[in-house]
Amino acid sequence: MGHLNRNLTSGRIGKQLVSLTWPMLFGMMGMVIFNLTDTFFLGRLGVKPLAAISFTFPVIMFLNGIGQGIGIGTSSLISRNIITADRDQVRTMASSALLLGLLVVVVFVVVGMLTLRPLFSLLGASGDILEYVHDYMSIWYVGVPFVVLPMVGNNIVRATGDTFTPGMIMLTSAVINAVLDPLLIFGYGPFPEMGVKGAALATVIARSVSMIIILIILFKREKIITLHPGPFLKIAQVWKKVFFIAGPASLGLLITPLSLAVITRIVASYGKEAVAAFGVASRVEMFAMMVISSLGSVLIIFIGQNVSRQQFPRIFRALGYASRFSLLWGGSLYLVLLFFGSIIASVFTDDPQVIAVARQYFYIVGASYGFQGLVTLSTSAYNGLNKPYPSVFFIAVRTLGLFVPLAWAGNALLGLQGIMWAGFIANILTGIAAYSNLRRVVGKLRDAA
């Protein structure tokens, strides 16, 4: 198999983390470019389509969370076995995980299609905005399998120690989407003018290409996927191991859009401009934090291998490097947002009210990005340790335990700014608590070894 058995249990830790993380940036950049591209071009259509996309964001995050959770479970399982297990076992793990991703997502797509209008009406969409949401999601739902299968497949390849190939696949898909978006939204040349439907169709086509590429790599290059993974009992055993991580990981990833949906509902009382501003700010935030997200994904692989060999000093050093980088990166981002927040927001809309609210968001919540990064890194590290429950616990604390109730209180006391301060406080407190507990967990594992 092409890239199997890249050993991360020895060698220079800093160099390994950097060499694994920078290719991940291509993938993370691809994910963010997808959202930013749709936001940019739909923003040219007006505030209503932009607000409609903001309403879809929690649901899209929800379904993406399912796929990412299965991918995280797969990556954790394979990284903890790839050095010691034989190749047939690895093939069974990878193939069974890919099948699991397909089966689970089909169920949720059917449910989503049947509840499209009631769900988004519950979130606060109505009138023309609800129609825009329906136009977008009715096509996007059809393409969800094309989104989830590459997620799981890319995590399989990453677990082998190759982070470059998945990153390039995701970036390629994002470029295809960026090219198709204006053609299908505005109807340039021979393409029909489809509006928000065009944005959804561009996404489906781009994701389809990435699915084809990753399946070819898994089958032909890595030879890590087989059409005959074994008897159902063996497949079910793999599913159980994947679900041990994927269940809590998916729950953690789903909690975030759930809380975001509640926040969106609160923000909606301030009008479509406020919803659009929060949508713009959320997408910029994803872009700004993609380096930390990339490093978090790498920690799953790195810690998975090292915990299997009980290399706890290496794990402690890696966590030290990662935490210091997160705080430094967060501080640097905040300085950029302080000086260029308005300019960044104006890239996506020319509405002065949307720009003003987005800028305010950057000034308040942006100051906590370094600590938000600690939450991201800590939750990833827990999954690498095969300890998924602290991960979902701290995600729940940050979102449902702190952000949502503080947002309700802040909204009552300070209005829209109070919602932003709620995010700031939730990031700071949870970041400190999650990272401190993580070091205690690793210390207990070391002492018990």
Image (cartoon, grey):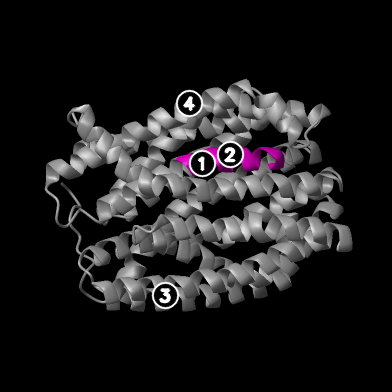
Determine the CA span between mark 1 and mark 4.
14 Å
Determine the CA span between mark 3 and mark 1.
29 Å
In the picture of the structure, the residue carrying the numbered disc 1 is: 64
Question: How far across and how far down the image is residue 421, in percent?
Answer: 76, 66
Q: Is residue 64 on the magenta stretch?
A: yes
Query: For the residue marked with disc 3, what is the amino acid?
Result: Arg
- Disc 1 crowd rating (10 Å Cα; few below 14, some 14-19, many 20+) is many
Q: Nearer the viewer, residue 111 or 293?
A: 111
In the picture of the structure, the residue carrying the numbered disc 3 is: 439
In the picture of the structure, the residue carrying the numbered disc 2 is: 60
The dot on residue 107 is 4
Query: For the residue marked with disc 1, what is the amino acid?
Result: Asn
Query: For the residue marked with disc 4, what is the amino acid?
Result: Val
- Disc 3 crowd rating (10 Å Cα; few below 14, some 14-19, many 20+) is some
Nearer the observer: mark 1 or 4; the answer is: 4
Circle 1 SS class: helix
Which numbered disc flags the more N-terminal residue, 3 or 4?
A: 4
Prevailing SS of the magenta stretch: helix
For the residues bearing labels 3 and 1, Cβ distance under 8 angstroms: no
For the residues bearing labels 2 and 1, Cβ distance under 8 angstroms: yes
